[in-house]
Amino acid sequence: MYDNGFFFFFWYFYSYHFVGLKGLDDLPYAITLPLKSSFVECDENITLNHPWRSLLDFVYFVISSPSPSLRLVFTIYVHGISGLRFLSVTPSRPIRTVKARRGQDTAAAATEEGNGSVIVKDENGRDGRVVPAELHKEATEAYMAYAMSVLLGRALPDIRDGLKPVLGKFHPHGDSAVYDSLVRMAQDFSLRCPLIRGHGNFGSVDADPPAAMRYTECRLEALAEAMLLADLEQDTVDFAPNFDNSQKEPLLLPARIPNLLLNGSSGIAVGMATNIPPHNLGELVDALSVLIHNPEATLQELLEYMPGPDFPTGGLIMGNTGILEAYRTGRGRIVVRGKTDIELLDSKTKRTAIIIKEIPYQTNKASLVQKIAELVENKSLEGISDIRDESDRTGMRIVIELKRGSDPSIVLNNLYRLTALQSSFSCNMVGILNGKPQQMGLREILQAFLDFRCSVIERRARYKLSQAEDRSHIIEGIIVGLDNLDGVIDVIRKASSNAMASATLRKEFNLSDKQAEAILDISLRKLTLLERNKFVDESNSLMEQISKLQELLSSKKQILQLIEQEAIELKNKFSTPRRSLLEDTDSGILEDIDVIPNEEILLALSEKGYVKRMKPNTFNLQNRGTIGKSVGKLRVNDTMSDFLVCHAHDHVLYFSDKGIVYSARAYKIPECSRAAAGTPLVQILSLSDGERITSIIPVSEFAGDQYLLMLTAKGYIKKVSLNYFSSIRSTGIIAIQLVPSDELKWVRRCTNDDLVALASQNGMVILSSCKIIRALGRNTRGSIAMRLKEGDKMACIDIIPAVMRKEFERISEANQGRGRSMSGPWLLFVSESGFGKRVPLCSFRLSPLNRVGLIGYKFSSEDGLAAVFVVGFSLADDGESDEEVVLLSQSGTVNRIKVRDISIQSRYARGVILMRLEHDGKIQSASLISATESEPEEVEAASEVLNRRAKMKQCSQSNKDSNVQSKYRKQNKVLN
């Protein structure tokens, strides 16, 4: 330690070989730099581009960027704040020996130079070994050299054999990395075709670690030996010395099929990475054969035989968009899902379970199960009651039990979206070719392998040809010796040594050294006539083999045929069926609609444009004549406008008073409680100022034979094909042209076989066929629907389906000449004052449009029609309506009652009280919904009712006395 600072040596050495340092003479770099507070400037006019904040940052920067041959020593001298210097030296100049000064010389040097730093001077007194250089350039060059060495020597596989550099025996880095690689090559869930057969614990798909090296055993798989090592000893590849020059190891292996595509590869290096998926052996050989027969084959032709990756863990590959992109450019994203089944656990309670049989590639099964459990515990994943792992040696089985009433498809889609049950494999097909990292597509990789395999076949053929020619040469000499056996024996007998005998044989019989040595090495038993014939046969066989090898080397076609033949042999012996199935669907991207149940919902719309979504059980069933339940809090001077039932996945068409239609999914409306005020429609739709939504139509499918029937306040009606509204821009499109001061009020969906019922506020009704209404385009006005009397307005419109129309026509024909029937279907009238009634549909006759109509409801001067519905769609066993109607008052009170409780009366009757409105104004809107299912606890009680109703149905006939039917209706009412 010195008084004015400290003296610190740091060196970093990195190389492939052990090279010892013998002193300062072995150091080609000595860098000196002044330490400034900003670390931006230095003397010798050197400018740094990196403003290191501290000395530690600078040292970390340098030592993290070494090159394979870089050896650095940093002589750091700190004096206060500004004593550090780095001098960059290149070894191009002659380096003279440095002698360290000891004792007093060292002290003198320390006094003269500052603090013991070593300075070398040339004859002129200058620093002869020091050449100023910019540090950032030196670091950049060193870093690039290091990066390339890692890319080529460690991280990226070779395109030709699909392997990374081979380790022959030992390595100074130790054998832990080698054992990890060996373990992975033995895992059938990591490699599509494992190369190692392991005995012992080699890990699991749950990411359990393998046993220690001393507890496991392994050997090569038959496929690995046949695919990679078959021709290794026939001079098919180059060999190079290992790290300590003790032995030679191959630079690559003579693979017979593209192992890079068979088992895939992954690796990350400096600024570059690779991730190649595995493939099926049989499909890979087929694609290789296609390219052999047709070198100009397109990617589509290759995909016919190899449609995509084949992962060892199976799974479902969603779509082929990512596969096409990866095979074409070398980079793509493949979406993989686990393979699942739905099992019924209990037929009585309808409880089901999701069974996961396969998971995506490189997914940790234990982590997947734990993640699902955490999501269920955190309420992020609903509908799951239990999860357990029942996997064993026979296969994978993860059981996810669902709660009663849960939709398995929705839960499964949530699992895909929130867990690794659906994951993506990012293809980045980068490998080493001709000493450079390259990103290649499928065709380029196969072509590069074919070129490599051709060179292997040529080298193997030349090696065999050389061996055959050498052997043929020796056999020729042996045959010559056997033909001159007496002379050969005489020469050998007279020779004084082996060398003299060999020389005499060469001279007497014109033999080469090898032939003479072969004759001398022959044993006496080989001198028989039978052995001579064997040598002659061997000579003929060798000549035939030489001819075939020469022919092979001269024909590229035969080389390719041999490549295909050897690959097909491996396919026939080792191929297995495909594990990953390809789904011809979308890319597997999940949207909101995939994870939202398509359940029945209620939509409520207010006059001021507030909408909300509620569950159907928000309003319980009530009796006729009750006050009802409030639909929620309303804004000041706001009233309810519409109330309807649809499904969450439906397209909801919003029609405004200005004749503009907008579209949005039903689930886009936020779900809220009954007491909530709702969401302004301007947050969902692009409404203009003053524009109001007057009608809402839910559409689950845009069928070509369906239409929308529009009715304006002034009585104009128009029919437009539903297909015109399948694609609506966010700003809306024109639905109908309006006359001045008119507005669009009602829109209904219909077909040509349906009937339409039109009603005015004064109770006038027209029943007409939809077929007679001509279909028009969107940007038209329509025709007159009804002749309205002075002061009268249109009140509502409803559609009578074709099925109910046939029943209506049958009943009308049956009742001709007799009294009116009171059986369904019926028109349900709801007045503004809360009264209502059912009138048989057969009480009205069909008539064309633009008529006054028939009286359907006779109102007082202060009352009017609020809504009219065609009921009788759903009938119970007793022939009564099984539907329900939801009434909505202006103040927001809702009442839900059974249609069967509403009396059947004539067209002129006043009706019965449906909803008491002493303080609630008038009925604003009404909606018809199907009957709710019985609760489980009511099933037992309801069974008795159904049995009694069945008996009543058997007893009742079409023309039975009404008193008998009345008796059973009373009994049924008591049971209800």
Image: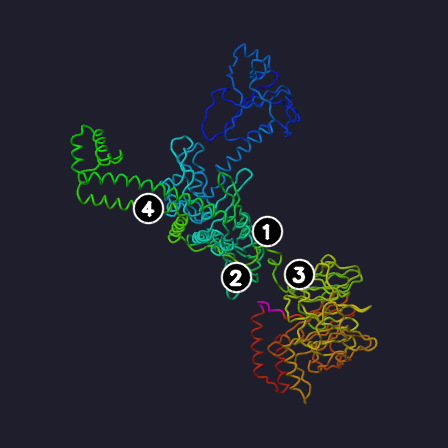
Disc with the residue nearer the chain's start (2 vs 1): 2
Disc with the residue nearer the chain's start (4 vs 3): 4
Labels 2, 4: front one: 4
Q: Residue furthest top?
A: 104
Per the rendering, the mark at residue 451 is none
Badge 3 crowding class, 10 Å Cα cut-off, few under 14, some 14 to 19, many 20 or more, is some
Residue under label 4, please give it. 547
Mark 4 secondary-structure assignment? helix
Disc with the residue nearer the chain's start (3 vs 1): 1
Q: Is 698 left, or right, of 348 in this rendering?
A: right
Residue under label 3, please give it. 665
Residue under label 2, please give it. 352
Mark 3 secondary-structure assignment? strand
Labels 1, 4: front one: 4
Per the rendering, the mark at residue 378 is 1
Q: Is 539 left, or right, of 112 in this rendering?
A: left
Mark 1 secondary-structure assignment? loop
**Where does the image place residue 77, in percent across and percent down from the top left?**
59, 20
Nearer the observer, 630 or 677: 677
Mark 4 and mark 2 in contact (Cβ < 8 Å)?
A: no
